Amino acid sequence: MTTNPLLILIINMTVVFFVLFVLELLTRGIYYIDPTRKKTAPAAPAAVEAPAAVAVETVEESGDDLAVVAVIAAALAAMGESGHVSVIRRIDGTSWTQMGRMDAVNTRTQMY
C-alpha cells in the first residue's frame, strides 16, 4: 500500500470518473432500448401543404374572485391572525415557482 496522498488522489479520481463514464453508457443504452419511448413518425412528404393556422382565443376563467377573497379573509379571522391583510392576489405560474415563493415566505417568517 502507498501512503503518498497525491497517488491516492489520482487513483480515487480515476475510479470516480470511470464509474461516471460507465453510468453514462448505461443511461444511453437504456435510452436506446426503452420500450416505452414514443417512436417518431416518418416525415410527411414535402409536397403536401399544411392547412392554414386557425386563430384560437383563450377563454379566461370566470370565477367569483370576491367570494374567494371572502373565504380567505374568513379563514384568517378564524385562525386568530391579528393584523391587516393588504393584498390578496392570485399567483400564476408553475408549481416550482409557487413552491419557491412559499419557501421564501416561510424562511422569512422563521428568521424574524
Image (cartoon, helix red, strand yellow):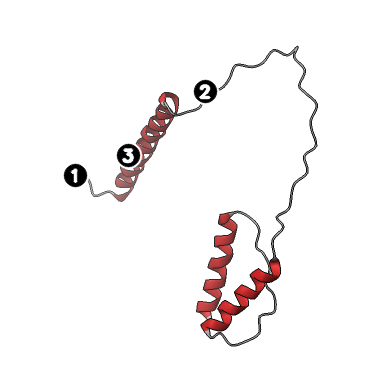
The three-letter amino acid code for the residue at tag 2 is Lys
In the rendering, which numbered label is found on residue 62? none
User: Taking 111 as reference, is 52 above or below it?
Assistant: above
Q: Is 77 on the left or on the right of 55, as rendered?
A: left
Mark 2 = which residue? 39
In the rendering, which numbered label is found on residue 15? 3
Q: Residue at x 41, y 24 (%)?
A: 33
Q: Residue at x 34, y 42 (%)?
A: 10
User: Taking 44 as reference, is 53 above or below it?
Assistant: below
Q: Which of marks 1 and 3 is nearer the N terminus?
A: 1
Q: Is 40 on the left or on the right of 93, as rendered?
A: left
| Mark 2 and mark 1 residues within 8 Å of each other at the beta carbon | no
Question: Residue most toward the left?
Answer: 1
Q: Nearer the viewer, residue 87 or 73?
A: 73
Look at the numbered disc 2 and give the secondary structure of its residue.
loop
Q: Which residue is drawn at 66% across and 72% down?
A: 69
- How far apart are the alpha carbons under marks 1 and 3? 17 Å
